[in-house]
Image (cartoon, rainbow, N blue to C red):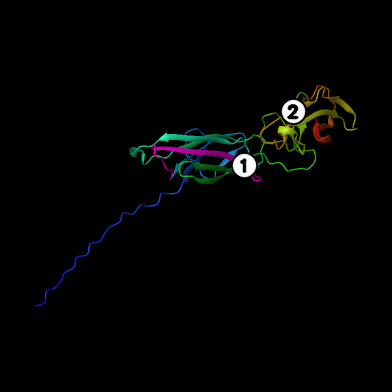
Amino acid sequence: MRPVLLLAFASTVVPTTLPAAPLELVRAALSDVEGGAALPASFDHRAGETMFFSCRIAGFQKGPDEKIHLAYSVEAFDSKGVSLVELFKNDITDEVTPQDKEWMPKIQTEIPIPPLIAPGSYKIVIKAEDLVAKAKTEMTVPFEVRGHEIAPSETLTARNMQFLRSEDDAKPLVQPVYRSGDAVWLKFDIIGFRYGPKNKIDVSYASSILDSSGKVLWTQPEPTSEQTESFYPKLYVPAVFSITVQPGTRPGPYTIAAQVKDAIGNQSYEAKATFTVE
């Protein structure tokens, strides 16, 4: 019988290394209180409130010294791409041990919403860089703001002129009728002014009382002025005026005439609103 040669073949198993997970921003959350529960995306934030933002960084790499080195920034924008607040940026350098394999660095910061801002859709842009792996990533988190509705204007004007019984009334009077001894409150919004350096505004207004014939009965001694700078440009200037109906005031219609001035834009405008004394 012819001998049979048996050949043994040995297979070599080459270990494979899984590719590293990409750098990623995860677990983004917005809250209206520090350390509070995450709010739904449909939540309406209010102009003037402070939002608390946080997220985590995943997929980072560590160097030969077992340390990570991350840099990140957080910035909020309006629908036109204008920054609401100054850019917040920071970096993280830390040692990571095998016991920390589930740990993810946390980004957290406060974002104050400007008080005189239009309602609408806004966004937060978060950027992160892994300086060890030479990798970058970013994420956009949208949010909604509920604010004071005011129609825009290219020139100086007054909007939303409303009479009230008291300064804190939520709803204006349908019929602005007052009696002797009543306080007459008028609120309106000034818009269409120009901005100087650092979003400086210089707006003033002075009010007068006119009778039915147009005769000036009284004029505010000193104008009320708003001379301020702000990081985010103020959309409008809220104006308020009050006067008390004196005893013996003749019944009939009266008009409040407000002379509004924009010193930076060299503009002026007269706003008028009429009320009745019974």
Identity of the residue drawn at 90% across and 32% down: 214
Q: Is residue 184 visible?
A: no
Give 155 or 95, whichever is nearer the viewer: 95
Q: Amino acid at mark 1?
A: Phe
Q: Is residue 65 found inside the magenta-colored segment of the image? A: yes
Give 11 or 268, whichever is nearer the viewer: 11
The numbered disc on residue 227 is 2
Across and down, in percent, residue 145 comes to 61, 41
Position of the N terminus by quadrant: bottom left
Give 37 or 54, whichever is nearer the viewer: 54
Give 177 or 228, whichever is nearer the viewer: 228
Task: Name the residue that disc number 1 marks.
Answer: 77
Identity of the residue drawn at 53% across and 42% down: 127
Across and down, in percent, residue 239 comes to 74, 31
Number of numbered markers: 2
Magenta range is 59-81
Position of the C terminus by quadrant: top right
